[in-house]
Image (tube, rainbow, N blue to C red):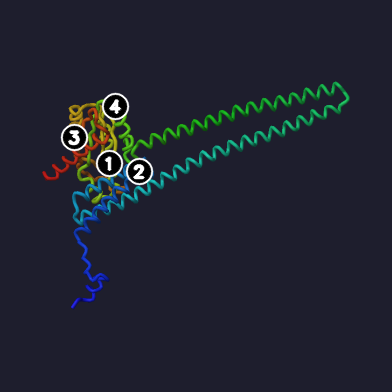
Amino acid sequence: MISLKKYLDMGATGVLAAEPDTSELFQATYESYRSLLLAMGKTAIQISPAMGSDFETNLQSLERRVSTNIAPESIRQVESQVEVHVQEWGSRISDHLKAKADEVREVLVALAKTAESVGYRDQSYASQFKEVTGRIAQIANLDDLTEIRSSLVKRVSELKTSVDQMNRDSRELVAQLRAEVSIYETKLKSAEQLSLRDQLTHVANRRSIEERIRWSIESKQKFSVVMLDLNGFKQVNDSHGHLAGDDLLKQFAIELQSNTRSGDLVGRWGGDEFIIVLACDAAGAKSHIDRIKEWVFGKYTLIERPGCEGLVVHVEASIGLAEWSTGKTLEDVIGAADTAMYQEKNRLRHKR
């Protein structure tokens, strides 16, 4: 006898409906989840290129982690990290938009004040001219020529005083406008410089790194790219909190910057990944890497929470090196450095 459930599953066709394949369902869900992570990062770039690059890089890193380890615990950890990055990016984009709105409001207020002052000045002088011309018209009613002459000289003097005052006010207004324009030019330049800096570490951000690489390629300048990924950074965040993790990134960036030549560029690619653009070939870059291992790697004292210092951690990083050659694109060089870096990370992981 056919059970009621099987009878309902057969439907009108009389053919028993097939049970869904659990492995296929999991694979489809798994692929959709990875695609969603990448799509979220691309959308953030479209919303704000300056603010979305770090967010996209973080999601790409999480997508790579999911692609190499599909264990339930690993996916739960990735899900937790995604939530943290989404909340952090949402807060940053909210603050960014509020700052932009405040800048626009300042400009509008300045324009309104200028328009108000011009209107007030014109009304004031219009009143003065009206008064002077009225007095001049009354001169025609005077019979004494001497009095007419005296009144006319006085009125002309008043008129000249008004015109001179207008000229002075105009010069002061122009000077004021120039000063205000200069202030806003300075603000715009500062904002442009900030848009090329990582907000946390204050080294170059992803956009600035890409611009330097594109310029070097277009100028056919010899250069190499060194990519660094901090080992054990996730454990620092998980065990001691994001404040300690942020402090580690700041200190590492400072040490990296201080041990790099002024003509080279140090930047944060995203998350715990840094990039150095060196104006030399691979051989010169290797000697620079040796310097980093000697002077940048080592012990760091971190802040766990406000008012609490003394957490000491040993910091090293997996390093990937790629040299640019004619015909290679930005993506080629970054991809080669990224691959080399992950190969070293895997080698160190297996070595342990």
Report the residue at 58% width, 36% height from top: 114
Residue for badge 1: 249
Alpha carbon separation for disc pair 3 and 1: 16 Å
Mark 2, other Cα within 10 Å: few <14 / some 14–19 / many ≥20: some
Residue for badge 2: 45
- Mark before the other along the chain sequence, 3 or 1: 1
Q: Amino acid at mark 1?
A: Leu
Residue for badge 3: 293
Residue 142 falls in which quadrant of the image?
top right
State the residue in front, 3 or 337: 3
- Mark before the other along the chain sequence, 4 or 2: 2
- Mark before the other along the chain sequence, 1 or 4: 1
Q: Is residue 162 above or below residue 206?
A: above
Residue 193 falls in which quadrant of the image?
top left
Along the horizontal axis of the image, is 140 left or right of 10?
right
Query: Which circle, 4 or 3, is nearer the viewer?
Result: 4
Report the residue at 24% width, 42% height from top: 301
